[in-house]
Amino acid sequence: MHAHLGVDADRDRWLACLPLAHLGGLGVVLRSLLTDTPVDVLPGFDAATVADAPRTLGTTLTSLVPTTLDRIDPSPYRWVVLGGSADPTVRPANVVHTYGLTETGGGIVYGGTPLPGAEVHVAADGAISLAGPMLARGRRTRDGTVVSLTDDQGWLATGDLGRWTAAGRLEVDGRADDLIVSGGENVWPATVEAALATHPKVAEVAVQGQPDPEWGQRVAAHVVPTDPADPPTLAELRAHAKATLPAHAAPRALVLSAGLPRTALGKVRRSALPT
């Protein structure tokens, strides 16, 4: 990864600000130790501290997730490695999308390009499988035995869907079980979330599929309003979504909320959203 990004231990300095119990945070520390690259470790993400780190600490590199990146200006950094979930938002040139799993020891695809030794297969239905020496040997069960994560050819089924672009880069759409099929049309929650997040009355938003007797599933938007006294209406959000997305991607249900359930990395826990 350091070779891919041209990291130089004499001029670069990492900032670790994601939880070390997750590989997005721990990986920063491990890479620094392996390459003798200076690193500063924060007890957690603080937007003001992270935004000032290039000036106060001399930081040039950090690893974030979309939720944390949205809270800072990334321009002072040489590279911001962005992982955590599919991110359809257009980012500055110094933000590098990474793709990987806990089972791969973190990111193994950077900017759509697999690292040396990493193999990526995308099936006809978009299912992504991974192979390579970075894969975990297996998953340890309660009785201590280790169960292989791969098939007999060494491929790990990730549960993600994606595609190769014309330029030969991997585009990850999201988790297969997050995909909403409404009226026979595929709708990715992250794409709708990115569109709705630009509405001035929306502070936070998460999208999920809900059962619908007519459409099979309907697109439901869970919204934290900017002003609880003046929340957006469903009609406003539908019109806003349809300005940039197909009509089938516009939400058909609206749930107002005081907050969204998130993991320690800041990813929305869709399974915990009220239906």
Image (cartoon, grey):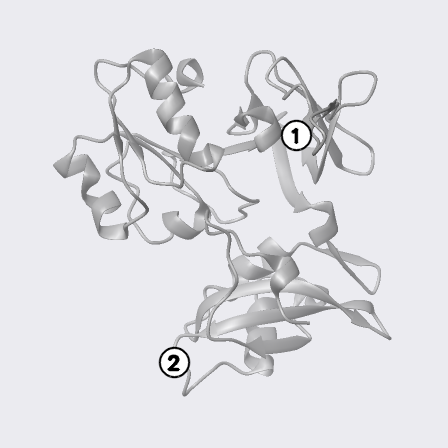
Give the left or right position of residue 13, taking residue 32 as reference: left
Q: Which mark is residue 166?
A: 1
Q: Looking at this rendering, what residue extends furthest in the left direction?
A: 56
Instruction: Examine the rendered structure and indicate whether residue 112 appears above or below residue 47.
Output: above
Whether residue 87 is visible to the viewer of this picture, yes or no, is: yes
Q: Which label was assigned to residue 227?
A: 2
Q: Which mark is residue 102?
A: none
Q: Amino acid at mark 1?
A: Ala
SS category of the residue bearing label 2? loop
Q: Residue furthest front?
A: 143
Three-letter amino acid code at disc 2?
Answer: Asp
- Decide: few, some or many residues near mark 1? Use Cα within 10 Å; few <14, some 14-19, many ≥20: few
Q: Is residue 96 visible?
A: no
The residue drawn where x is 81% and y is 22% is 151
Question: Foreground: 43 or 207?
Answer: 43
Secondary element at image label 1:
loop
- The structure residue drawn at horizontal position 55% and vertical position 83%, both measured from the top left corner, is 233
Q: The N terminus lies in which quarter of the figure? A: top left
Q: In which image quadrant can residue 63 be found? A: top left
User: Of callouts 2 and 1, which one flags the residue occurring earlier in the amino acid sequence?
Assistant: 1
Give residue 193's quadrant in the image. Answer: bottom right
Quadrant hosting residue 140: top right
The nearer-to-camera label among 2 and 1 is: 2
- Residue 199 x, y percent position in the rendering: 46, 70
The span from disc 2 to disc 1 (Cα, nearest Å) is 43 Å
In the rendering, at what x and y percent does residue 183 appear? 83, 65
From the viewer's perspective, is 39 left or right of 110?
A: left
Residue 158: x, y in percent? 70, 34
Nearest the viewer among 97 and 16 is 16
